[in-house]
Amino acid sequence: MSTEKSIWKKALDWHEERLPIISWIDHSLGTKYPVPRNLNYWWNFGSLAMFMLAVMIFSGIFLAMNYTPHVTLAFDSVEHIMRDVNYGWLIRYMHANGASFFFMVVYIHILRGMYYGSYKAPREVLWWIGLLIYLAMMATAFLGYVLPWGQMSFWGATVITSFFSAIPGIGDSIVTLLWGGFSVDNPTLNRFFSLHYLLPFVIVGLIFLHIWALHVPGANNPLGIDATPADKIPFFPYYVMKDVFGLAVFVVIYFTAVFWFPNALGEAVNYVKANPLQTPEHIVPEWYYLPFYAILRSIPNKLLGIIAMFGAILILFALPWLDTSRVRSGNFRPVFRIFFVVWVIDVLILGWVGAQPPEGIIPTIGLIGTLWYFGHFAVIMPVLGWVETPKPLPASISQSVLKAAE
Amino acid sequence: MKKILLAATAAFTFTAVSAQAAEHVEIPKEKWSFDGVLGTFDRAQLQRGFQVYKDVCSACHSLNYISFRNFEALGYSEEQVKTLAAEYEVQDGPNDEGDMFKRKAKPSDRLPKPFANDALARMSNGGALPPDLSLMTKAREGGPDYVYHLLLGYEEPPAGVQLVTGMSYNKYFPGHQIAMTKQITDGVVTFADGSPNDAAHVAKDVTAFLHWAAEPKLEARHSTGLRVTLYALIFAVLAFLAKRRMWKNIPH
């Protein structure tokens, strides 16, 4: 083999001396990024979330080329996309269903972090940035849902923005500012469109921070113990290949929804143009908000309900300290495992409650579910850390992996 | 004045009645040619359904998102579409003299609306506004099954149910009181191809047509979907094999 450098290698070296972008990518998600060898498939969902963000941004750019943010034209322009734009139906269905799949993937990603203690020291800031991404996603999805200007778009926007009127003193002014007037109308649609295009790029920025904060301590793993260099393998090609496989499986499921059940996750009434004079029978938010909507409605006082709803997410920021156990992985915490599953079921019940009209026993179930939700973080998690006896941890990942391989 | 008041009252009760749909009526499932992984539209059925729309529904209901040119998807030739469009008159203008004028419709024109505006539509229909049908099969829970059964769901009101003046009782309509009277009856249209024209067949044909109007790209969606998803599936298998081979000597 010749020792002479090829012209391409020389050109690359020249460029790398001036801007080492290839080395930077290699260190971020390539051969120079060591990752614990024992990650299971629950660790695939971070890359899937990034894929979904890319799908949303690309499909969104093409939708924006053909969409008109005006109350008289918005609904018609969406139908124009569906009927007259080449593959417009595909772009729109990918975007509309993409929002749901983005949330599904992110919810699994969050639950994985909660079960394996990925929020604990030294990854608290990583966890926080993740929660900020989640909040930005919620805002983006809400703004985007308003844009087709169907009945649920309009009435959902009216209900959600009215929440802010409960803030004492300045509430009404905030609502006027959000609306750009005295009701949800054209100025509302215009600013929502503008912000809906802006926020995804804020999310992109947050993802850079998220990955940066991930690289400082390195990835957690299913055992939750610190990984030594011997326990690690390079991200490329091993985890890139694993992520590609996971992505292919995910894409099959996502495409099944896009091509055969494109409206299953949507509300039929949103195919009726917004009518400020006619309220739909039930105003329900998209499924990914339902547990929080249930928390809001289960508390009889409007202001307290809103505080509880936002508190349900904000309390997660304190989770690294509310969880007093030093053991990260739920695999070694027999009692925590049970309470974790109960909490997930509680959130699912709250989601169901959020979809029901608030009649009969429903608000009571919602209230119990809400109390359990907060009790889990405020009482169970701290107490559990003190009273629970964790199972003995393995000395190292390699030891545990080799033992299992025997 | 009295007429307007009456219309306003009817409009109010109409919305009030439709708002209190607490009970849940099970909508039976129907078989459609467009169901399934590779479901397609039946062109002959769409043409029959269009005839029903044209002869019956279009007296009150618009189809705002449909242009004549779209009817080529029903299996009509370009010439047939031109001839069909020419049966209609649309307003155009202003011309060089500044006057609006009527002309024969062209394939690029949208279907003319039955009423010039919503107020006129309400006035002509006892205060109720006949909804646009372009998206009807997607805009109601139950989709085509709901539309089909609604068209046939007219019944005598059960004992004790007081109908508002001008309303009909319909088993499947939320709240059961619907401003549209029964339209689809045996023999309401006669099909050129001699297909059965009892109420059930007519309702089925027009519902299929309306589903085409709501989801005109359904066939492309199904066929593209099958190709794309099969490709992804094969890719997933290959990716799995590649992953397994790559990880073979890595204890994990």
Image (cartoon, rainbow, N blue to C red):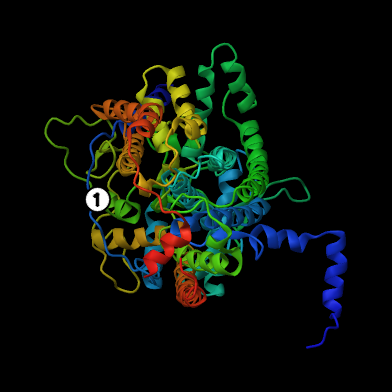
The answer for which chain carries disc 1 is B
Location of residue A239 (image quadrant): bottom right
Residue B223 placement, left or right of B204: right
Please name the residue shown 29% across and 73% down the image.
Answer: B194
Residue A350 visible: yes
Q: Determine the residue located farthest toward the left in the rendered image.
A: B159
Please name the residue shown 30% across and 55% down the image.
Answer: B145
Q: To which residue does mark 1 refer?
A: B27
Question: Which part of the image, by quadrant, shows the N terminus of chain B?
Answer: top left
Give the camera-side residue of A77 and B121: A77
Q: Is residue B180 above or below residue B249?
A: above
Give the camera-side residue of B3 and A310: A310
Q: Is residue B134 above or below residue B3?
A: below
Residue A349 placement, left or right of A267: left
Please name the residue shown 57% across and 37% down the image.
Answer: A128
Estimate how packed mark 1 is, as few (under 14), some (14 to 19) or many (20 or more) residues with alpha carbons within 10 Å.
some
Location of residue A304 (image quadrant): top left
Q: Determine the residue located farthest toward the front in the rendered image.
A: A395
Give the camera-side residue of B197 and A111: A111
Q: Determine the residue located farthest toward the bottom in the rendered image.
A: A1
Q: Is residue B73 above or below residue A399?
A: below
**Does dot 1 land on a helix, a strand or a loop?**
loop
Which percent across, then down, holds residue A205? 68, 45
Which percent across, then down, holds residue A291? 39, 36
Which percent across, then down, holds residue B229? 46, 70
Q: How many marks do you count on the picture? A: 1
Residue B116 placement, left or right of B135: right
Q: Determine the residue located farthest toward the top in the rendered image.
A: A169
Which percent across, then down, holds residue A212? 66, 48
Residue A284 visible: no
The amino acid sitting under disc 1 is Ile
